[in-house]
Image: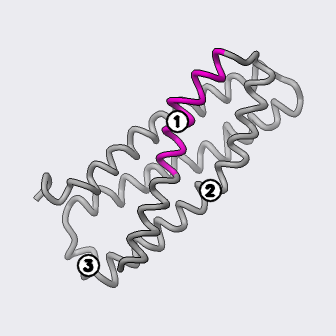
Amino acid sequence: MGVALLLHLLAAVIWVGGMFFAHVALRPVAAAQLESPARLALWAGVFKVFFPWVFAAIATLLLTGYWMVLSFFGGFDAVGMHVHLMIWSGYVMMLLFFHVFFAPFKRLKRAVAAGDWQAGGKNLAQIRVLVGINLVIGLVVISIASGGRYLLS
């Protein structure tokens, strides 16, 4: 149980922490200091490095989450509402990430490669909004994980 919980928490910290850093720290500095071509190339490169970590985090969260529920907590009928909220919120986050990865990020990479800065900016703006939504959901999930059993009992 300890290993599963540790891996689960590390995966959540990597994903949500990465979104927090990107959205709150990197984005405003990049927007203030870089012209569009350099900013879009930076983001395409950052996402290219970060997104494999998100895929690994998703796989880890799914495996460890189901492992803990099924092996240690007595199954889905035995866990509290806070666990069900975490699971469903996680599904929403995963779907949003998959959309970002397979749609606007794919288009952003193509636009940067072609030097189409207007299209790249449009796709980066879409990614920014979706990452912002996912960040809020992720922070809510962390709140549910840390205090949900006390607040939702």
Q: From the image, which quarter does the C terminus lie in?
A: bottom left
Q: Identify the residue at horizontal 67%, vertical 41% (top origin).
A: 103
Mark 3 crowd level (few <14, some 14–19, many ≥20, 10 Å Cα):
some
Q: Which of 121 and 11 is in front in this view?
A: 11
For marks 1 and 2, the one nearer the N-term is 2
Where 145 sits versus 107, above or below? Answer: below
Alpha carbons under labels 3 and 1: distance apart? 33 Å
Q: Where is residue 68 in the image (x, y as percent from the top left)?
A: 35, 76
Kind of residue sitting beneath label 3: Phe
Where 32 sits versus 87, above or below? Answer: above
Q: Considering the numbered disc 3 on the image, is that residue within a helix, a strand or a loop?
A: loop
Residue at numbered disc 1? 130
From the viewer's perspective, is 28 left or right of 123? left
Residue at numbered disc 2? 53
Q: Give the range drawn in magenta.
A: 15-32
Q: Which of 103 and 33 is in front in this view?
A: 33
Q: Identify the residue at horizontal 40%, vertical 46% (top origin).
A: 138
* Residue 19 belongs to magenta span: yes
Q: From the image, which quarter does the N terminus lie in?
A: bottom left
Occupied quadrant, residue 2: bottom left
For marks 3 and 2, the one nearer the N-term is 2
Q: Which of marks 1 and 2 is in front?
A: 2
Mark 2 crowd level (few <14, some 14–19, many ≥20, 10 Å Cα):
some
The dominant secondary structure in magenta is helix
Kind of residue sitting beneath label 1: Leu
